[in-house]
Amino acid sequence: MPGYGSKTCDAAALQSQIGQKATTSTVEELRNRSGSTTARVLRPGQLVTMEYNATRLNLIVDDKDVMTAIRCG
């Protein structure tokens, strides 16, 4: 897909959001702020694909959907 890989994720400025709840609107806001094309919420015990994707934002949450880590890939 032409241009698909042109937006890379930058999670550095989002680290202050750790400890906040990952609501649908928060996920979309953080995806936009990071410059990524996609975002996913990773819950405890969830099976995920492990391929690295420089355009994807990963929001790692606890069992109450509170973000414990924010990183790209």
Image: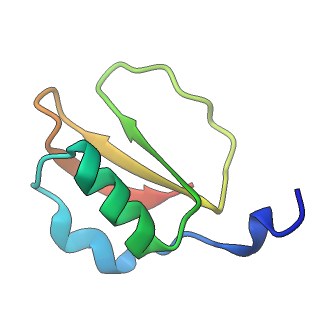
- Say which quadrant the C terminus sits in: bottom right
Image location (x, y in percent) of residue 34: 44, 72
Q: For the point 21% across and 49% down, which residue is it?
A: 68
Q: Residue at x 75, y 74 (%)?
A: 6
Q: Is residue 16 above or below residue 52?
A: below
Closer to the camera, 29 or 18?
29
Identify which residue, 21 or 1, lies in the foreground: 1
Q: How is the image coloured?
A: rainbow
Q: Residue at x 15, y 26 (%)?
A: 63
Above or below, comparing residue 66 to residue 53 in the picture = above
Left or right of 41: which side holds 69? left
Residue 11 visible? The answer is: no
In this picture, residue 57 sits left or right of residue 21 = right
**Image coordinates for residue 5, horizontal then vertical, percent:** 77, 66
Q: Quadrant of residue 7?
A: bottom right
**Residue that extends furthest to the front in the rendered view of this protein:** 25
Residue in the foreground of this view, choosing between 64 and 44: 64
Q: Position of residue 22 (x, y in %)?
A: 21, 46
Q: Is residue 50 visible?
A: yes
